[in-house]
Amino acid sequence: MRHARADDLAGCTGLLGELRALDGVRERTAGSFYRRGAGFLHFHVDGDRLFADVKVDGDWQRVPASSARERRELVRFAARVIREAGS
């Protein structure tokens, strides 16, 4: 498993746009999101599968992000993590 590169995320413009719109989230490099100055979400590739690592209470949690359903769930999950952390 390796970190996703910009070309790995080329087909994810909708997903990336939704993540960019989350409260307090900034994308520093393609697919690498920060919140409050710390890493919050980034992507990995394993074969033809895409995964996101989301920081939850100081630990990274891996979330599948290949299918449209998985991507919708990822955005909802990331938004919930932000809400529960108290923006």
Image (cartoon, rainbow, N blue to C red):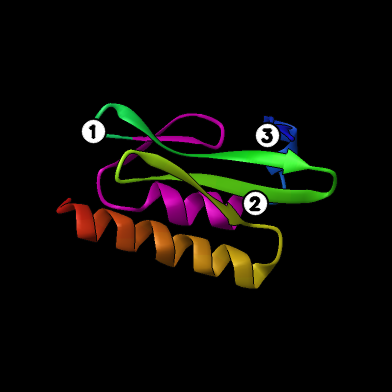
Q: Earlier in the sequence, mark 2 or mark 1?
A: 2
At mark 3, the secondary structure is loop
Give the magenta-colored segment's residue range.
13-34
- Within 10 angstroms of label 2, few (less than 14), some, or many (20 or more) residues? some
The three-letter amino acid code for the residue at tag 2 is: Cys
N-terminal-most mark, 1 or 3: 3
- Residue furthest to the right: 47
List x then y, in percent, for residue 25: 32, 42
In-image side of 20 versus 11 (left or right): left
Name the residue tied to disc 1: 36
At a point 84% along the width and 49% down the height, the residue shown is 48
The residue that appears at 73% across and 40% down in the rendered structure is 45
Graded by Cα atoms within 10 Å as few (under 14), some (14 to 19) or many (20 or more), the crowding at tag 1 reads: few
**Mark whose residue sits in front, 3 or 2:** 3
User: Looking at the image, which is closer to me, 31 or 49?
Assistant: 49
Find residue 8 and report its horizontal and vertical position in percent. 74, 39
Could you say which is closer to the camera, residue 49 or residue 17?
A: 49
**Residue 19 falls inside the magenta stretch:** yes
Per the rendering, the mark at residue 4 is 3
| Residue that mark 2 sits on | 12
- Of the pair 12 and 55, the residue shown nearer to us: 55
Left or right? Give the position of 23 relative to 86: right
Q: Is residue 66 left or right of residue 84?
A: right
What type is the residue that disc 3 sits on? Answer: Ala
Let me know if residue 69 is in the magenta part: no
